[in-house]
Image (cartoon, helix red, strand yellow):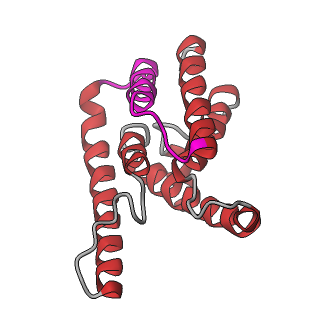
Amino acid sequence: MSLLYYTFFGVALVFITYQDFKLREISWWTLPLVLLFSFLSTELAFSDLVEPTLLNLAFVGINLIAITGYFSLKNKKLVNIINTQLGIGDVLFFAMTCFIFGVPSFVLFFVSSLILSVLYVLLFQRKDTTSTIPLAGIMAAYLFVLSAVDRFTSIKFVRNDEWLNSLLS
């Protein structure tokens, strides 16, 4: 990722984090900015991004369907989880991150960011008077850290699954 694109990418992620923690909402225009600077910084051809992005979107879709099913069964009626259990900004952030990672790295990012969110609730939510969780903000902060590690070290997380594949084999 070129330093200029990385800087804009990072500023947008920090802005998302700030907004979500402060206001419990994010501005919709920040997500296309993150996506744009992510695309501009990639060395992969657009055609190489299509299959992993579609698989990542399917993974998110299955998770959203499962969450909807769970809350619908729990409430004994069909429940729209958007703006009740999850904010629209969270869902849009999920979708945006689908374009950034390969499939194994995305699944690891998604699951580990949800674990970080649970840790946030356990450690800080009792002190917080709001009942919502800044999920997109936590994920944006985590993505910022991973991207910084990716940019400034030899460890490559973003759009590179080789490190994960070598760990699993």
Q: Position of residue 87 (x, y in %)?
A: 42, 54
User: Is residue 143 visible to the viewer in this orientation of the structure?
Assistant: no
Q: Residue at x 55, y 18 (%)?
A: 8
Q: Residue at x 42, y 42 (%)?
A: 97
- Assess whether residue 116 is covered by the magenta stretch: no
- Assess whether residue 34 is covered by the magenta stretch: yes
Judge left or right: residue 32 versus residue 9.
left
On screen, residue 130 above or below 136: below
Q: Position of residue 58 (x, y in %)?
A: 27, 56
Occupied quadrant, residue 70:
bottom left
Q: Position of residue 18 (x, y in %)?
A: 63, 37
Judge left or right: residue 100 versus residue 11.
left
Q: Residue at x 63, y 27 (%)?
A: 151
- Count of labels in the image: 0
On screen, residue 137 above or below 36: below
Q: Nearer the viewer, residue 11 or 101?
A: 11
Which contiguous range is marked in magenta? 23-45
Q: Nearer the viewer, residue 148 or 140?
A: 140
Occupied quadrant, residue 118:
bottom right
Judge left or right: residue 132 versus residue 38.
right
User: Is residue 165 visible to the viewer in this orientation of the structure?
Assistant: yes
Occupied quadrant, residue 65:
bottom left
Q: Residue at x 25, y 37 (%)?
A: 50
On screen, residue 59 above or below 91: below
